[in-house]
Amino acid sequence: MRLLSAVSFILLMAGCAATLNSTQQIRLREVELLRSQPTPSDWHPGSVWSFVQSGEDGSPVLKATFRVTDESAETCSSGNWRALELVEGEVGDGSIQLTHAYSVSGRLLTLDLTGGCDFGQIQGALSDGSFLGQTTGGPTTYGKSVPKRVVGRRLY
């Protein structure tokens, strides 16, 4: 929903669809295709998933395992968000309490692991017990890009 809202805002500001570049047009089509397909049965309340995000040197930047719940969660984004229960690993440095949440629409999975409005999200595709996605938005550190690719798999 957040991506669709962002694209709608871009269209509104630009005045017409012709201003979307080809990369944005392709991404919008990919998102709509994922949303139109059924959510894989592996993603359900009670299932446990592990997610890993690696830095440019290959070392893990994020390595965390979550249990999927059906409990509502609040984030800065609109939509139907549900809580993720942290089972193993950590997100952040532990200095503040973070909200871990997900929104799923068809095969499109969006993760908000911080609950912070400006920290970005992870978005990608679910497929037969696996997830392949990337970070969207969020900060950079001293001008360096934030690692992008995130992989996940269902443990049980």
Image: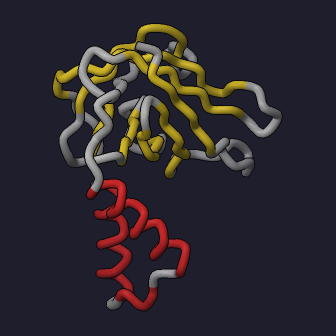
Vertical comparison of 101 with 119: above or below? above
Q: Residue shown at 17%/27% (left/top)?
A: 72
Q: Report x, y in % for residue 141.
A: 69, 42
* Image mark count: 0
Q: Is residue 52 left or right of residue 40?
A: right
Residue nearest the observer in this picture, 24 or 107: 107
Quadrant for the C terminus, please: top left
Residue 62 in which image quadrant = top right
Q: Residue furthest right?
A: 57
Q: Residue furthest top?
A: 88
Residue nearest the observer in this picture, 120 or 49: 49
Vertical comparison of 10 with 120: above or below? below
What coloring was used for the rendering? secondary structure
Q: Is residue 26 left or right of residue 99?
A: right
Quadrant for the N terminus, please: bottom left
Residue nearest the observer in this picture, 101 or 68: 68
Q: Residue shown at 20%/46% (left/top)?
A: 79
Q: Report x, y in % for residue 7.
A: 36, 70
Q: Residue shown at 22%/28% (left/top)?
A: 73
Q: Report x, y in % for residue 9.
A: 32, 72
Residue 135 in which image quadrant = top right
Residue 52 in which image quadrant = top right
Q: Residue shown at 57%/34% (left/top)?
A: 151
Vertical comparison of 103 with 45: above or below? below
Q: Report x, y in % for residue 60.
A: 69, 25
Residue nearest the observer in this picture, 24 or 151: 151
